Image (cartoon, grey):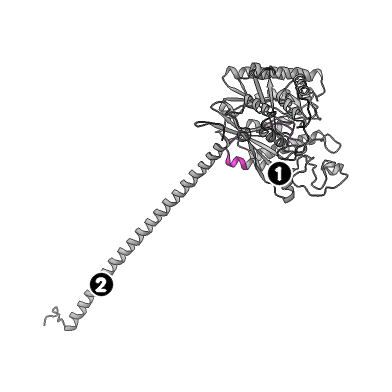
């Protein structure tokens, strides 16, 4: 037999057939495994795709709902105004009279102004966040600014107005003094800047932000320079991103501020000019001198020139300061000297009522309003108006409060504002400060007028003596102390004080409406 020839035995045929069968089975199973693996991968991919789609849908739904909720809030704020169509709004915060007191002691009663330095008794309860009858402790200042920061998380804030009195009362003492006032101003300014580094902040001089109470700096004094060192970066917005338009320059700011503590700034993309004034120069509480009178007149000339320039450029103006023109209804005396009041009112009413879209003042620590009419005897004369902001400090029988104001950039008019407050009694009792909405102007004082303007305030003023409805009066009287127990008042004094800016007409009004109480 040839060696290459192989004999196939019966057993070999069986083994070969078995091998072929096993190979075929393996190949069939392998194909099944690959098919199942492919199906599993497809299923996993499909499920992943579905999950991604669901996540995208949830995100879109959430954002849509959030925008709708925000839109609903805006719409509800303007409810009852009859506002139609899209409205372009910018919003800003108005706060005032912080009166930060570094000597505040939570254990000392208000009879000692909450200060250990003059304490003659301790309080019956601990007041961490402030006490009625005392100025603001650090915790109240910080909590108030945090509340504003929280509001800014929901609302797009364009800028902030701080209308004076950053420092506490009674700082010109043996244990404090002018340097402490500057320190208080710097402390509050830094706190503001740390929370709002990306928007302009416009602070103003109050009667407690001076080298003495109602004592203006003299020639050669560097007080304004020292104050500006705390404020310049806030006003110029030196740390703002490139998308934020600078409201002014260092040179322009220093030129007027170092002269008398006043300045101008561009807001609303250049459509509106903010004119920040130092109304202490016109105050009856300031001791007069030749220098003071000269600076008082110079500031009025500056104001007139600014308003003339604003009008020539087709812009609008907002005015802001600490002490307003008009009557202090607490003692029925004028805030300003009559000659300055007359010049100022002529400018904002007869000459430039079409330019001035609003004025923002404070000082009284009350939620209030003021009308300015060049001819008060007629209802159709040129008018202007003032919004008086409530205070952060609870020293004058009030809860801490601030406002969120809306400016319509299409109509270049004030659209509305919402006021926030903290119930100090509740915050003290439960050691838990809670800020909440006090009211929205358009809801509290409804009108067919869709804007906050002089006619709207004129209407509000007339409603205060409406014999058939107390709705406006009740809302106004209780809001003056921002939901704290109302102090005693004379209804007609408040009515006349809101209506008449000049003292002679105020006196005629109170003589006409002579019944006290209300």
Q: Answer left or right for 303 relative to 36.
A: right
Disc 2: which residue? 25
| Residue 354 at x, y percent in the picture | 60, 19
Quarter of the image that includes the C terminus:
top right
Residue 488's disc number: none
Q: Pick out the residue farthest to the left.
A: 1
Residue with the most extreme front position: 468
Tell me where residue 197 sits by quadrant. top right
The residue carrying pointer 1 sits among few (fewer than 14), some (14 to 19) or many (20 or more) residues within 10 Å by Cα, namely some
Q: Given this view, does label 2 or label 1 mark the residue nearer the observer? A: 1
Q: Is residue 336 above or below residue 89?
A: above
- Observer-nearest of 448 and 250: 448
In the current view of this chain or complex, which residue is farthest to the right?
120
Q: Where is residue 258 in the image (x, y as percent from the top left)?
A: 72, 25
**Quick check: is 435 in the magenta stretch?**
no
Mark closer to the chain start, 2 or 1: 2
Q: In the figure, is residue 212 to the left or right of 64?
A: right
Residue 252: image location, x then y, percent:
65, 24
| Front residue of 29 and 287 | 287
Q: Is residue 223 something that shows in the picture?
A: yes
- On the image, the x and y values in percent for residue 207 come to 77, 29
Q: Which residue lies under the disc numbered 1? A: 423
Q: Give the range drawn in magenta.
A: 150-166
* Count of all numbered marks drawn on residues in the image: 2
In terms of secondary structure, where does tag 2 sit? helix
């Amino acid at each position: 037999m040839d060696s290459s020839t192989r004999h196939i035995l019966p057993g070999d045929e069986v083994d070969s057939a078995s091998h072929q069968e096993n190979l075929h089975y393996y190949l069939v199973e392998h194909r099944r495994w690959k098919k199942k693996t492919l199906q599993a991968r497809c299923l996993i991919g499909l499920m992943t795709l579905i999950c991604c789609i669901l996540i995208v849908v949830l995100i879109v739904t959430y954002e849509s709902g959030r925008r709708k909720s925000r839109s609903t809030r805006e719409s509800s704020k303007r409810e009852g105004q009859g506002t139609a169509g899209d409205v372009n709004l910018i919003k800003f915060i108005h706060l005032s009279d912080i009166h930060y007191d570094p000597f505040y002691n939570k254990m000392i009663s208000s009879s000692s102004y909450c200060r250990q330095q003059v304490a003659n008794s301790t309080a019956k309860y601990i007041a961490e966040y402030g006490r009625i009858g005392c100025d603001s402790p650090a915790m109240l200042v910080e909590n108030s600014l945090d509340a504003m920061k929280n509001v800014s998380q929901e609302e797009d804030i364009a800028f902030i107005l701080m209308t004076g009195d950053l420092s506490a009362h009674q700082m010109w003492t043996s244990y404090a003094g002018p340097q402490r006032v500057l320190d208080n101003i710097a402390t509050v300014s830094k706190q503001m800047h740390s929370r709002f580094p990306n928007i302009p902040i416009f602070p103003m001089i109050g009667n407690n932000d001076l080298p003495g109470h109602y004592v203006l700096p003299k020639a050669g004094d560097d007080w304004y320079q020292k104050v500006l060192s705390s404020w310049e970066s806030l006003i110029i917005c030196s740390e703002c991103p490139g998308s934020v338009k600078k409201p002014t320059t260092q040179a322009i700011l220093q030129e007027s501020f170092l002269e008398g503590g006043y300045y101008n700034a561009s807001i609303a993309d250049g459509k509106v000019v903010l004119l920040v004034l130092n109304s202490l120069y016109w105050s009856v509480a300031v001791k007069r001198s030749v220098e003071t009178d000269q600076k008082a007149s110079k500031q009025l000339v500056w104001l007139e020139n600014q308003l003339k320039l604003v009008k020539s450029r087709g812009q609008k103006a907002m005015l802001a300061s600490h002490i307003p023109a008009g009557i202090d209804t607490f003692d029925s005396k004028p805030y300003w000297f009559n000659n300055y009041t007359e010049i100022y009112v002529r400018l904002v009413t007869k000459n430039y009522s079409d330019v001035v879209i609003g004025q923002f003042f404070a000082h009284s620590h009350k939620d209030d309003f003021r009308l300015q009419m060049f001819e008060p005897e007629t209802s159709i004369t040129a008018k202007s108006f003032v919004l008086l902001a409530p205070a952060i400090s609870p020293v004058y029988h009030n809860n801490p409060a601030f406002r969120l104001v809306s400016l319509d950039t299409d109509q270049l008019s004030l659209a509305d504002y919402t006021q926030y407050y903290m119930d100090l009694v509740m915050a003290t009792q439960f050691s838990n400060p809670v800020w909440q909405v006090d009211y929205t102007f358009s809801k509290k004082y409804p009108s067919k007028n869709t804007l906050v303007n002089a006619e709207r305030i004129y209407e509000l003023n007339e409603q205060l003596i409406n014999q058939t409805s107390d709705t406006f009066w009740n809302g106004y009287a209780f809001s003056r102390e921002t939901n704290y127990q109302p102090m005693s008042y004379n209804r007609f004094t408040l009515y006349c004080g809101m209506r008449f800016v000049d003292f002679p007409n105020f006196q005629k009004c109170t003589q006409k409406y002579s019944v006290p109480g209300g």
